[in-house]
Image: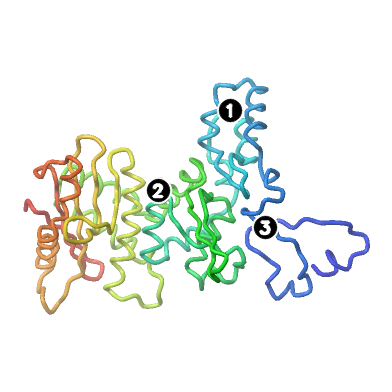
Amino acid sequence: MFNSTFKTNPYLNRAIMTGITRVSRESIFSDLNNLEVVTTTSEKYADCFGFTEEEVFAALDECGMPDRKQEVKSWYDGFTFGDHTDIYNPWSVLNYLDKRKAGTYWANSSSNSLVGKLIREGSADIKQEFEDLISGKPIIKPIDEQIVYGELEGNEEGIWSLLLASGYLKVLDYEEDWESVDAPDYELALTNREVRRMFCVMVRDWFGRSRREYNEFIKAMLADDLKTMNYYMNKVALATFSSFDVGNKPSEAAEPERFYHGFVLGLLVELADRYTVTSNRESGFGRYDVMLEPKHEDDGIILEFKVQDPEDEKELSDTVKAALEQIEKKKYETILMEKGVPREKVRKYGFAFCGKNVLIGSDQR
């Protein structure tokens, strides 16, 4: 069908096919092998994929909203094509001009289920890099613009190529070594405020029916209410562990790790105004699991996750004790104290897992 439509059709002068991942390598297109592929990193037609800033600002002036330019820029600017920057999402801009208020117009116009599935079921590294993106930090990844849809699930790094091609990531910089056979490295960031809002909603949806319990856990943690923390964390773990399973029979040791990275992303979304949330970073003499660095006058919080080792730990309380001892031994609070948080304002919690059972203890009790 595609060959007869595009290649051997005597009545067709030219045509444009649009999409996200390439089609010219798929077997069903084997006869259609002479396409010119224009990608997000191509120079050709770079200013035709969206509205330029000049066009957007002129439209705002014409619609009587000259004072809204910075708002529109933060929400819908950020797309880069080739060396062209400040390309705006046309669908979102048109909706903004019509409704005269900001919203996730483009993000809500299609399903993001594939992206959500790839991130939710991705490795610890994928989730940690996604934590950086939501926190506003760039990541550096190789991008393969040759990737096709069928290769995404077998190529974990392919998610970044998909996110770039889909418009969810923008290129800040790139470095290509022409003597190397590897894909070039790109410095990537979330495209704009609309995209970040979409991903925050996606992370919240991961907790589904346990969303209320998750929020109650966060409230209890901020209040240092250990009993309530234990109550709600067990409800959340029971309801959401399976959401982060990727194998047919995930091991008990693997389940908490999958859950904990989703848990960290949830903290990032819910506590963005009060804390800088980081995971698996160096501090003192080791790498902590989760750290909440206060932006204002709140306490600093360190969380350590451990799976019960039946040979060494007869009770979950023994595992909690081991987690707390690790925090102390490795001096994880060092980085918080270096940033001005007094030692007495650093709270430490040990999380012990056995299957879907969780026990939380603190250095105070």
Residue shown at the point (33%, 61%) measured from the top left: 239
Q: Please state which of the two labelled residues, at mark 1 or mark 2, is closer to the viewer.
A: 2
- 160 to the left or right of 308: right
Residue highlighted by disc 3: 19
| Residue 71 or residue 254, whichever sits in front | 71
Residue situated in front as seen by the camera: 236 or 148: 148
Could you tell me which quadrant the N terminus lies in? Answer: bottom right
Please tell me which of labels 1 and 2 falls first in the chain.
Answer: 1
Instruction: Give the number of callouts.
Output: 3
Q: Specify the quadrant of the image occupied by residue 63.
A: top right
Residue for point 53% across, 56% down: 163
Disc 1 to disc 2, C-alpha distance: 30 Å
Which of the two discs, 3 and 1, labels the residue nearer the N terminus?
Answer: 3
- Residue located beneath label 1 in the image: 100
Q: Residue drawn at (84%, 65%), measured in percent from left and top? A: 5
Where residue 189 appears, as percent x and y from the top left, is 47, 49
Label 3 secondary element: loop
Q: Give the Cα separation between the discs numbered 3 and 1.
A: 29 Å
- Which secondary structure lies at badge 1? loop
- Horizontal side, residue 27 vs residue 224: left or right: right
Q: Which amino acid is tagged 3?
A: Gly
Decide which of 60, 185 is in the foreground and name it. Answer: 185
